[in-house]
Amino acid sequence: MDSQTALDALRSEGDLNLSPRRQSWASRHLDEPTRQMVAEDAELFLHQSLSSPCLNALQKCSGATLTDWQGRELLDFHGNNVHQVGFGHPRVLEAITRQLQELSFCPRRYTCAPAIELARELTRLAPGRLKRVLFAPGGTTAIGMALKLARAATGRFKTISMWESFHGASLDCISIGGEAIFRRDIGPLLPGCEHVPPPDNRHCPFRCGAACNLACADYVEYVLEREGDVAAVIAETVRCTPFIPPLDYWKRIRAACDRHGALLILDEIPICLGRTGRLFACEHYDVVPDMLVLGKGLGGGVFPIAALLAREDLNSALAHGALGHYTHEKNPVACAAALATLQVVQAEGLPARAQELGAHLVERLRRLALRHPLIVDVRGLGLLVGVELGYPRNGQIVRASDEAEQVMYHCLSGGLNFKITQGNILTLTPALTISRAQLDRAVDILDQALARVVPTSRPTTQG
């Protein structure tokens, strides 16, 4: 692995705060009160490469936008994927405020109306036999519950997951995850965590290229067969970069799991609730997993809550054991926020809206690619969109990582916020409530930023 590839692996989940370009941007754009806030944050919080020391400070958020401490407005195409219904949706805020005045907490051993109503609505909406629910304070803990349920249900402990995947930052989640920045130098991880290549045709190790024969899916079955005692295959239905698997991919994996007695767990924590143009991304593939994990946007961009949906028959796997046992398992305020979010998603037709606006965004970006050769791919599913930057070289694409970072900081200066994944993919995930005019303004900002890029790689004619 060369040094650039190693650095890109560390940048897989976003830009690093060690970048000299970040320091330069901050020195030009932050006023003294903001610098003081950022400095105080750095003095108080443990430093992490993807957070503190921070880039900037915010004072408010609303709809599809953020406003920084200096009053500058940013179109937010990042949002940590919590803002399907936008920031501060009135219906969500009203539900939270009302619930705070009625019942603010529900101790264990008790239930409450918001938790029951939310569970009923999720199981009504969920595909297939996903009729049992557990709630958790966040997606990472919900993944942990899924792993424990898979062990209890199968009597096995091994898993198969994807390289380059992300399921959370706890020790169990980075064990099944496949990103270097979380796994590197952390010491022993969970045993039995097998990894396979993701369904990413651009970087396919099987060299399938455009003529994909789903060798990556066949390899999952190969590992299932050779191991013989795998509890579950766990993966993101669609990776946030995004990697969009071929239509038959998940059907192959579903069939392979059934043949070898393994459960299929799909992680839709960042992309659930309409972002891909369907309420659940697995609906695009006509596949129902044994467990489905939701999170992030479930709390309406306000309250942290995640959910594990499971097959009805898995309810008997634990007898009287514990999967979660979390203090805020049935938090009434979180459940009220989530229930209001589901109501907004349906009442405002956000999945269909994401499909329509996503098609418009991808079409505009592909027109942009005709004028900016740095763009080597534009792909999307609903309002989950990726713009890959690179240079053709000897039949391969060389990642334009430094150029991607330039684009990001130019866009921040112009009023557009997003994150970079894998070092060179501009990952665009706006609120599903965003207007077409705001989408067009974002593309205009990106167009201007691309025009200002100074090439640092050496493009050559494709061989």
Image: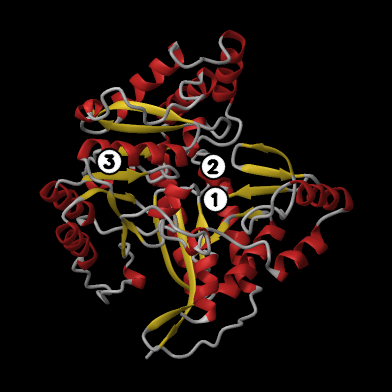
Where residue 52 appears, as percent x and y from the top left, is 69, 52
For the residue carrying disc 3, how many other residues have a C-alpha within 10 Å: few (<14), some (14-19), or many (20+)?
A: some
Tell me the amino acid under the disc marked 1.
Leu
Q: Nearer the viewer, residue 223 or 434?
A: 223
Secondary element at image label 3: helix
How far separated are the C-alphas under marks 1 and 3? Answer: 44 Å
Judge by depth and name the residue closer to the eye, 218 or 141: 141
**Picture quarter containing residue 397?**
bottom left
Above-or-below relation of 287 to 310:
below
Secondary structure of the residue carrying numbered label 2: loop
Q: CA distance from mark 2 to mark 1?
A: 7 Å
Between disc 2 and disc 3, the foreground one is: 3
Amino acid at circle 3: Arg
Q: Where is mark 3, residue-wise? A: 151
Residue 439 disc label: 1
- State which tag comes first along the sequence, 2 or 1: 2
Residue at x 31%, y 45% (from the top left corner):
266
Residue ID at (60%, 53%): 441
| Farthest-out residue, left | 259
Measuring 31% from the left and 55% from the top, which residue is drawn there?
192
Would residue 54 appear left or right of 343 to someone viewing this image? Answer: right
Residue at disc 1, secondary structure: helix
Whichever of callouts 2 and 3 sits on the residue coming sooner in the sequence is 3
Marks 2 and 1 close (CB-CB < 8 Å): yes
**Residue 304 in which image quadrant:** top right
